[in-house]
Image (spheres, helix red, strand yellow):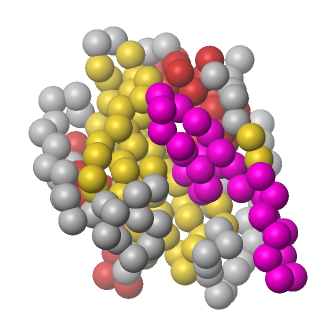
Amino acid sequence: MNRQQLITRFNLRALSHTQLSVKHLRLKQSAVLLPLIERNGEMVLLLTKRSPHLRHHPGQISFPGGKFDQEDGDLRYTAKRETFEELGIGARDIELFGELPHHDTITGFRIKPYIGFVKSDVDFTVNDGEVSELIEVPVKEFLSNPRHFILPIVRPQIKVDVYFKPCQGHAIWGATAAIIEQFRLLLED
């Protein structure tokens, strides 16, 4: 699938899905970027493995992103700012073309996922204080492999379904896995 096919399919699928937005004033606003880059004629999704010493979600597979700061102005800016802080990819090297519905987490975050192309000639400067590994997964692997499972987690007065999506030997789970599955469902035939 090339760049134009990906955009067309995404836009067609996104229009056919009703997106419900519920205000959750207690949730912290945050944003992530699903960065796509073309490698040898195919689209690749960039993921990060969080540094093991981080306070929140150490060692987990994630997208570049983070909490909204008042100086950001909007969540699009948050996604781009965080991508620069984690991977050294500047805003001029990112072309946003889509977004997914918010994803609320049990840990108190409301995540807004944005999807964008990263220039193929960009040089990464991985911030090892936040990222221990940069992972590149071909988009076609997610499209051809719908395998995932859901594990219900029960906490006092709440039950949450947690997504798990194993891929290339990595245990992708939680919000990242759920967002990948959302993206896959929009693009599948």
Q: Is residue 36 visible?
A: no
Place of residue 139 in the rendered image (x, y in percent of width and height, measured from the top left): 49, 25
Main secondary-structure element of the magenta-colored stretch: strand
Residue at the limit of the structure toward the bottom, as seen here: 26
Magenta segment: does it hold 71? no
Q: Along the horizontal axis of the image, is 49 left or right of 170?
A: left
Q: Is residue 32 visible?
A: yes
Residue at horizontal 53 percent and vertical 21 percent from the top: 141
Q: Quadrant of residue 9?
A: top right
Q: Looking at this view, is 115 or 87 the one in front?
A: 87
> Viewer-proximal residue, 125 or 168?
168
Q: 78 left or right of 119?
A: right
Magenta part of the chain: 151-178
Left or right position of 155 against 50 = right
Measured as percent of width and height from the top left, residue 166 is found at 58, 36
| 159 drawn magenta | yes
Residue under the point 36% across and 32% down: 136
Image point 35% across, 71% down: which residue?
Answer: 54
Horizontal and vertical percent position of residue 70: 38, 84
Q: Is residue 140 left or right of residue 88?
A: right
In front here: 113 or 98?
113
Q: Residue at x 65, y 87 (%)?
A: 26
